[in-house]
Image (spheres, grey):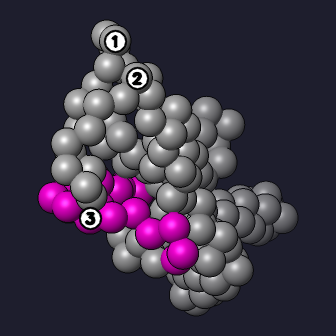
Amino acid sequence: MNTSFGMAAFSLLMLKSVANKFGKGTEKGVKVAMDRMESDAKTFSGANQVQVKSGYLKNSIKTRVTKSPTGNIVGVIGSSAIYAAIHEFGGLVQAGGSYMTFKGDFGWRKASSVLIPKRPFLKPAVERNRKSMKSNIIKSINTEIR
């Protein structure tokens, strides 16, 4: 039997094992980081804090970790609430008819449009957790390959 072939096959198996553990560690690290971002986004801290009435927006914030078609590990944070984007980015809401009626701080009002100021809650959570994400990933990789 050729011992160099045996060593090469063994080395290849070891390399695949380390690569597999590296990938698992990266995925676990991204998951930890995304969970922290989700928790942070749900606190709605900051000057332009989103007001909580029912808690629907807060409870709709979710994260997931997936693999792209090219094999990259991708973390995604978002909200399924229909009004999440208007809070995150701000914008002009226009009445479907001639005017809309809504209850404000000073009673019922009619308007043809309402300017909603931006009250970001996702982007600040991502920014606050950007630095710790790298250390979470490195820590998870080191734990996995030991």
- At mark 2, the secondary structure is loop
Q: Which mark is residue 98?
A: 1
Q: Residue at x 25, y 55 (%)?
A: 106
Q: Comparing marks 1 and 3, which lies closer to the viewer?
A: 1
The magenta-colored residue range is 46-66
Is 70 left or right of 88, judged from the image as shown?
right
Q: Which residue is mark 2?
A: 112
**Residue at 19% from the left image edge and 42% from the top image edge:** 108
The disc labelled 2 sits on which kind of residue? Answer: Ser
Q: Around disc 3, counting alpha carbons within 10 Å, would you say few (fewer than 14), some (14 to 19), or many (20 or more)?
A: few
Q: Residues within 10 Å of mark 2 (few under 14, many from 20)?
A: few
Query: Observer-nearest residue: 76 or 118?
Result: 118
Report x, y in % for residue 5: 79, 58
Q: In the image, is residue 109 part of the stretch drawn in magenta?
A: no
Q: Are marks 1 and 3 in contact (CB under 8 Å)?
A: no
Q: Secondary structure at mark 1?
A: loop
Residue in the image at 59% along x and 82% along y: 136
- Above or below, 22 against 89 in this view is below
Mark 2 and mark 3: span between their CA atoms?
Answer: 25 Å
Q: Position of residue 96 (x, y in %)?
A: 34, 14
Badge number at residue 52? 3
Establish if 8 lies above or below 64.
Answer: below
